[in-house]
Amino acid sequence: AQKITQTQPGMFVQEKEAVTLDCTYDTSDPSYGLFWYKQPSSGEMIFLIYQGSYDQQNATEGRYSLNFQKARKSANLVISASQLGDSAMYFCAMRVVSSYGKLTFGQGTILTVHP
Amino acid sequence: GAGVSQTPSNKVTEKGKYVELRCDPISGHTALYWYRQSLGQGPEFLIYFQGTGAADDSGLPNDRFFAVRPEGSVSTLKIQRTERGDSAVYLCASSLISGEQETQYFGPGTRLLVL
């Protein structure tokens, strides 16, 4: 079975500062993908960034980067230069080869960006 | 292009009633997924369709829940004899194909309230 753990229920950051949201995962499958989604108060899940288990380099997408440490089974999301619009719930999720369909999500972290 | 759409956006029903929730995936996406998100939690997988067939329905909580996708596009999640515990946001997602690298794109969800 797969498990995603997000230990930070809430995080606060000042506008224009960087913030790291933690995610650890557990799977015995050697091939997997890790995803981060943003869920604003409107409720829609917005895809942010993807990291494959065999990728040698950390993924980056604009202000988002994924700090992938395979040996530690962690996939932390780093948001640089935070903006007020970044305030939302953030979910880490995983898919494995053995269960192509499902995403397994963590509990989420609520990020609040202060002006 | 158009994203995943879900109707209705909100549904209020009484305990014991039957409800249908509709999902219209992104055009050309062969894989379709249903998730359920309870308040303050991450989404939980319900069922996955590849084309017209349910490839994985291991997340359906009991036999009151079933879903169809008769023509490989639109899907309907059906809940019989609704219970108050069924109250949640039901999210639909689609992806081009199924694979651990494939990004799932989510719809806005249907908020179901069972009184």
Image: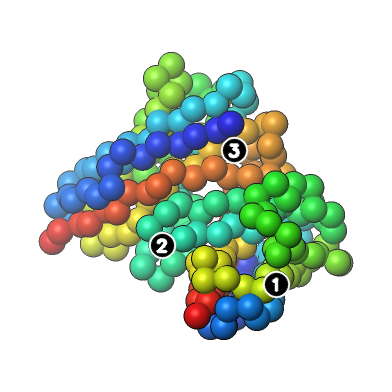
Q: Nearer the viewer, residue B106 or B85?
A: B85
Answer with the quarter of the image where residue A54 lies: top right
Query: Which residue is denoted by mark 2 in the rendering?
Result: B39
Q: Position of residue A85 (x, y in %)?
A: 29, 63
| Badge 3: residue crowd in 10 Å (few <14, some 14–19, many ≥20) | many
Question: Which residue is depicted at the point 70% across and 72% down?
Answer: B80
Secondary element under disc 2, as helix, strand or loop, is: loop
Q: Which residue is mark 3?
A: A95
Q: CA distance from mark 2 to mark 3?
A: 23 Å
The amino acid pointed to by label 1 is Gln
Q: Earlier in the sequence, mark 2 or mark 1?
A: 2
Tell me residue B97's x, y (percent): 73, 47
Q: Which residue reaches farthest top?
A: A71
Of A46 and A109, nearer the camera is A109
B40 to the left or right of B62: left
Quarter of the picture holding the N terminus of chain B: bottom right
Q: Which residue is labeled 1 in the image?
A: B80
Give the amino acid at mark 2. Answer: Leu
| Numbered disc 1: secondary structure | loop
Pointer 2: residues within 10 angstroms few (<14), some, or many (20+)? Answer: few
Residue drawn at the location 14% of the way across and 52% of the way down: A14
